[in-house]
Amino acid sequence: MEISIKPARVEDAPELVRVHFNSVHSTGAQFYSKEICQEWSPVPSQQRTKALIQAISSGKEIMFVAWVNSEVAGFASIVPAEFELRAVYVDPKFGRHGVGRMLLHRVEIEARNRGLAKLQMHASLSAEGFYKTQGYKEIARISHTLVSGKKMPAIKMEKTIRGG
């Protein structure tokens, strides 16, 4: 499987929303209730696509897309101003083929190139093992309060990406 990583474009947004939905409702469903997954990643819609287009266009969130042939296999993003790894999502169809690892490596390079020495994130329970194998350390167990008031358990994690 040949994987290529490219900067996200606004025209990729509908596919990124689809990947997010598929990933959350497949992998996330093993750790979270259906209600939490639905709130975390609602059914793809024009509203979600517009929000993602805005994120891509703003330049505040830097995104990369993994492609396998002409198909979107996953995406990752960082918010350099907040030292934040915002997302790594892989379509379940392409899971366990190195897509997530390649995306994570690419955003870490981007973060280093922008002068960041570390990245932090709030990882889902479903992604904890992946991030630990990639050198991220648990800082604390936390929970996000969703709009509905439901609590979504997560893990604050961090990785030093530049010696110092």
Image (spheres, rainbow, N blue to C red):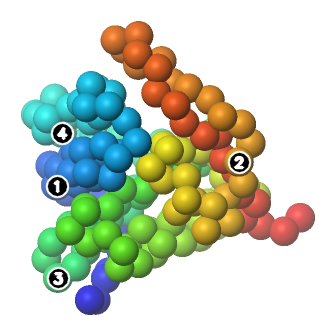
Q: Is residue 113 above or below residue 63?
A: below
Q: Which residue is mark 2?
A: 138
Alpha-carbon span between mark 4 and mark 1:
9 Å
Under mark 3, the amino acid is Asn
Which mark is first along the chain, 1 or 4? 1
Contact check, label 2 and label 4, Cβ < 8 Å: no
Contact check, label 4 and label 1, Cβ < 8 Å: no
Q: Which mark is residue 15?
A: 1
Alpha-carbon span between mark 2 and mark 4:
32 Å
Between marks 3 and 2 in the image, the one whose residue lies nearer the viewer: 2
| Residue that sits furthest to the right in the current view | 164
Crowdedness of circle 4 by 10 Å Cα count: few (<14), some, many (20+)?
A: many
Residue placed most toward the observer, 69 or 51: 69
Which mark is first along the chain, 3 or 1? 1
Residue placed most toward the observer, 16 or 40: 40
Q: Which residue is mark 3?
A: 69
Quadrant hosting residue 64: bottom left
